[in-house]
Image (cartoon, helix red, strand yellow):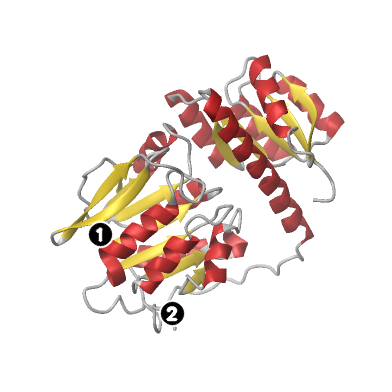
Amino acid sequence: MTDPVKVLVVDDSPLVRRVLVQALESDPDVRVVAQAADAYAARDALMAAAPDVMTLDVEMPRLDGLTFLRKIMHYRPLPVVVISAHTQDGAARSLEALSAGAFDVLGKPESAAGLTALRDQLLAVVKAAVHTRRTKAAAPARPPAVALGPLPVVAPLPGAGCELIALGASTGGTVALEKLLTAVEPGLPPIVITQHMPANFTKAYAQRVNSLSRLSVREAVDGEPLEPGTALVAPGGKHLLVRRDGSGYRCRVKTGPLVSGHAPSVDVLFRSVAEAAGGKALGALLTGMGRDGADGLLAMRQAGAHTIAQDEASCVVFGMPRAAIDLGAAVEVLSLEILRARLTQGSLIRHASAAPA
């Protein structure tokens, strides 16, 4: 980047502010232009310092961060990265923040080792947020959307059909997945999901989506059978895999090192689905930064599965899908709305050949 990324750090804890400032300013391309201990000081700093991005704690005195975020998104929208405590209340508020327009959510470190992980994640997310904003601002204006008629009725997967759906996402994925899972009917095959999210946040996320969906959505438990009409979410900090069990499937949840920089990793899930289900699976890689999931989606395609990457226009961050497309891992590139329509219709189709030539 030619210009340094200007960051406003907002947190009522002087210790947390100091940790965040040190993490951010360890990169010469990032500059903390202001700090604030509450929403009112943050409001003044926004006007005076004109930051590119803001980090925000959702639990603050005087005016809570969630209310402040909603005001920001209405009056002065900018990328906001939520830094939240690993508590049930903190997780619930963070999920509301994502729905209110926050770019991403990171957990506050709980150990010395967590400080290093936070620094690396924070720098990556802050840079991605600003890059995405600048890229979209520089993009030519798109023509007004043309109203399309209903999607045509399409043929289902041939043979035994789709037995398993695997979804992977990162930044922007919580909202994208919520749109998908709240639109579909319970008759779909089992769905397994890896969404990059801090430990302890995934359970609250699954509960939130479950309350809005006709599916049974819950955090995955090791050894649990996969059943139609259910969606299982990988627990934060652990990997989710699928194993064949007779005529059906079971999930495996296990701890392990980071894969493709993440735990849970989309690559881990997708590779296990490729091995367990082969051509009887559908995989979709949604919005997110980095490339986690690209290699796994390629493994699924090579195993005969139908594979989809979300298109750039509907992504918050077109990183993971772009990597998959560049690899030739995606049979189709679809907008989130078209994918949602496909799932709603149960139209999990296979075009031409799912396996690469």
Confirm whether residue 84 shows in the render: no
Q: Is residue 263 left or right of residue 70?
A: left
Q: Position of residue 231 (x, y in %)?
A: 32, 50
Tell me residue 12's x, y (percent).
Answer: 65, 17
The quarter in which the C terminus is drawn is bottom left
Name the residue rendered at 56%, 65% in the picture: 311
Q: Position of residue 92 (x, y in %)?
A: 46, 30
Q: Residue at x 51, y 29 (%)?
A: 93
Label 2 element class: loop
Residue 237 horizontal/vertical position (percent): 42, 38
Tag 1: Cα neighbours inside 10 Å, few (<14), some, or many (≥20)? Answer: few
**Residue 23 as seen in the image, left or right of residue 149:** right
Q: Which label belongs to residue 285?
A: none
State the residue at coordinates (61%, 72%).
Answer: 146
Q: Which residue is denoted by mark 2 in the rendering?
A: 356
Q: Nearer the viewer, mark 2 or mark 1?
A: 2
Kind of residue indicated by mark 2:
Pro
Kindly identify which residue carries mark 1: 187
- Circle 2: is it few (<14), some (14-19), or many (20+) Cα within 10 Å? few
Q: Quadrant of residue 147?
A: bottom right
